[in-house]
Image (cartoon, rainbow, N blue to C red):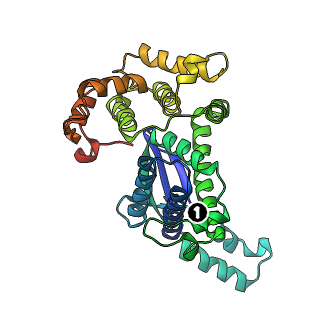
Amino acid sequence: MIKIKTTPNLYGVTLMGDYEDLDKLYDSLSDYLAFYKDNAEYYPYHEYEYLLSLNYDIRHCYMGDRGYETVENRADRYGEWASAARDYGFTDKAAKELKKLYNNHKHGNLYYSVEILYPLIFHYLVAFEEILLEEPEESWLETEAEFGWKWGERYSLIDAKRDRAAIINLVGLFWDNVQELFGKEKAKNIYDYFNEVEYTLPTSMYCDALIHCQLVNFEDMSKEEKLEFLLASIYEIIDTDNLTTYPEEYEPSTSEYKDAVASLNKYNIPRFPVREDFYDELDKVYDPKKPFYHEDFDKLLNDTYGENPDPFETGEFNW
């Protein structure tokens, strides 16, 4: 079973599952994303690669390169039943089998895990919703894949629907997490807003800016401040143009977004990377006629949103 839970300090979520579950999820994502990409009328390649980065983490997760933990499987119930076999009406033979089950499984199941930062969860939620808006069709199987073979030669409509269902389940887990984090009303407002607007696909650079600002600031922020940051992030990722152009039409999302940004300004954290402002800052340093290296981008983020000592290098990152 695939599970998702919020990390203790609200930096992100822990995605976890046993080896087979994660292996199947990896295959489903790999196959269906490629299938959709080859058949969608318009699907930016950078968005395809961005979702594949999630799959990259999932693969390394079940390979044991990320994290793992023992998950309670309620084997203690077997112990209770075995201890009170007669009270439950079990035979001696059944009691022995229950005791054996308890001894074999009392330590729980081994689950592999990987942490995924907010606001990437919001990005994945929106990006997957875009993919799931369109049902796969039989005609898609006639499409030539990237490496020259037809999809119908190695993939069927049943395969596609099975893999699509796995993605729907993953989106549902992300959605449950958002509801738990923000409450059902705010989560519903986010979902309704997304379904009413044609959002602008965010680039990985903008998402990196949001994460950078999050890592710089979260350690010194309260839970309430963190939730305001995350709420503002998800609306920025979806696109806030409609909130500013048609504020009354998109209530209550307009109020939620404005309140979140106002709260962040009140808390005096370094600048929150509003999408438009971020690209204005990027335009100041980016020259299409010259190379723009990763170090240049890191310098832009550090200068604009605060210095970020990379926690993945220092090992001091506390999820």
- The reply to whether residue 159 is visible in this rendering is yes
What's under tag 1, amino acid-wise? Met
* Count of marks overlaid on the render: 1
Residue name at image x 19 percent, y 36 percent: 290
Element under disc 1: loop
- Give the x, y percent position of residue 174: 57, 46
- According to the image, label 1 marks what residue? 1
Horizontal relation, residue 205 to residue 8: left or right: left
Along the viewing direction, whichever of 32 and 89 lies nearer the viewer:
32
Query: In this rendering, would 36 be left or right of 252?
Result: left
Q: State the image coordinates of residue 97 (x, y, percent, origin top left).
A: 66, 82
Question: Can you give x and y, in whole percent of width and height, for residue 319 in the image?
Answer: 39, 43
Q: Residue furthest bottom?
A: 93
- Kindly identify the residue that appears in the image at 55 percent across and 70 percent down: 151
Q: Is residue 197 above or below residue 152?
A: above
* In the displayed structure image, the side of residue 172 where residue 218 appears, left or right: left
Q: Is residue 75 visible?
A: no
Looking at the image, the residue that sits furthest to the right is 89
- Identify which residue, 166 or 259, lies in the foreground: 166
Q: Quadrant of the N terminus?
A: bottom right
Q: Position of residue 29 (x, y in %)?
A: 51, 60
- Position above or below: 193 against 103: above
11 or 81, nearer to the observer: 11
Local crowd size for mark 1, using a 10 Å CA cut-off: few (<14), some (14–19), many (≥20): few
